[in-house]
Amino acid sequence: MTRTVQQLFNLQGKTALVTGGSRGLGLQMAQALGEAGARVVLTSRKAQDLEAAAAELQAQGIDAQWIAADCAKEEDILRLVAETVQRVGPIDILVNNAGASWGAPAESHPVAAWDKVMNLNIRGYFLLSQAVANAGMLVRGGRIINLASIAGLGGNPIEMKTIAYNTSKGAVLNFTRALAAEWGPHNVTVNAICPGFFRTKMAEVLIDTMGEDNMASRAPLRRLGDDEGLKGLTVLLASDAGKHITGQWVAVDGGVSAVLG
Ligand SMILES: NC(=O)c1ccc[n+]([C@@H]2O[C@H](COP(=O)([O-])OP(=O)(O)OC[C@H]3O[C@@H](n4cnc5c(N)ncnc54)[C@H](O)[C@@H]3O)[C@@H](O)[C@H]2O)c1
Ligand SMILES: O=C(O)[C@H](O)[C@@H](O)[C@H](O)[C@H](O)CO
């Protein structure tokens, strides 16, 4: 008997680790995974923010825990993964989401800021994926979802100078394909989500500089992303409903990346 759609999307019994899960898109995705039945572990640097975010999910009946870690630091990543496995068991779903941006013209972009962005946005995704693979995912199978961006498909609007950010997000896209190729035989799927413009702490500078109506008008759907926008795709890619999808990039951007201007 084939499973029903409801069964395929069900994440009961699965454990998801969501980096940058204390707010913004990470929290939205953690909520979606939790609503589909997964146990979620949130991580970011600040314990206080994590505690509040986990409490918000717990109030909804979601099994949510948190562990503070800096996803730019290898020792923190190794501790985070070991502690997650020890506390809640093997990790079935990894959402690589913690990210940062920096605004400066390419010709004067500080190298320290370049390193900071690249360390978190791509080196961190690599180290986390590696740690989770070595903690059992290559044996049990699993799901990796990488937060890229439409900013990985081209430059940002020319008023916004974010060369390291755009470079890091481009790297996330091919990292996704290459890892999907390597780990497919282990029944691990690896996919990337390319969000468009969502009003979060990170994107508010861009949205306020460019003007919210202006940003919305760039999208064929004439709106920014909202706090439901990533939920469906996240659960699809994390569940058996998406078991045959790997190495793919999906833009959730109201159509921004479908038009040239
Ligand atoms: N908001 C958008 O419009 C948009 C668009 C495209 C892509 N994205 C991507 O989505 C992801 C989430 O961004 P967001 O918009 O929710 O931003 P946000 O600033 O609201 O959230 C970023 C999260 O990452 C965490 N974080 C930052 N540095 C960290 C570190 N060193 N270690 C651990 N955690 C750290 C923060 O605490 C927070 O939880 C990022 O990868 C971002 O590039 C966002
Ligand atoms: O589309 C995105 O990925 C985001 O909106 C980013 O572009 C950031 O908000 C920008 O880098 C601000 O510094």
Image (tube, rainbow, N blue to C red):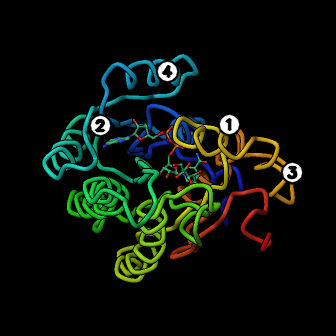
Residue of label 2: 88
Disc number placed over residue 227 in the picture, else none: 1
Residue at 69% over, 58% down: 252
Q: CA distance from mark 3 to mark 1?
A: 16 Å
Question: Mark 2 or 1 closer to N-term?
Answer: 2
Residue of label 4: 58
At label 3, counting other C-alpha atoms closer than 10 Å, the crowd grade (few under 14, some 14-19, many 20 or more) is some
Residues under numbered marks 3 and 2 in contact, where contact means CB atoms less than 8 Å apart: no
Q: Nearer the viewer, mark 4 or mark 2?
A: 4
- What kind of residue is marked 3? Arg
From the image, which quarter does the C terminus lie in?
bottom right
Question: Mark 3 or 1 closer to N-term?
Answer: 3
Res 15 seen here? no
Q: Locate residue 224 relative to residue 203 in the image: left or right.
A: right
- What kind of residue is marked 1? Asp
Residue at 46% over, 78% down: 177
Q: Nearer the viewer, mark 4 or mark 3?
A: 3
Judging from the image, what secondary structure is the residue with disc 2 in? Answer: helix
Q: Locate residue 186 relative to residue 28 in the image: left or right.
A: left
Is residue 9 or residue 184 the one in the foreground?
184
From the image, which quarter does the N terminus lie in?
bottom right
Question: Mark 3 or 2 closer to N-term?
Answer: 2
Residue at the left extreme, as displayed? 75
Q: Locate residue 28 relative to residue 127 in the image: left or right.
A: right
Residue at 21% over, 57% down: 135
- What kind of residue is marked 2? Val
Q: CA distance from mark 4 to mark 3?
A: 34 Å
Q: Position of residue 97 (x, y in %)?
A: 44, 50
Residues under numbered marks 2 and 1 in contact, where contact means CB atoms less than 8 Å apart: no
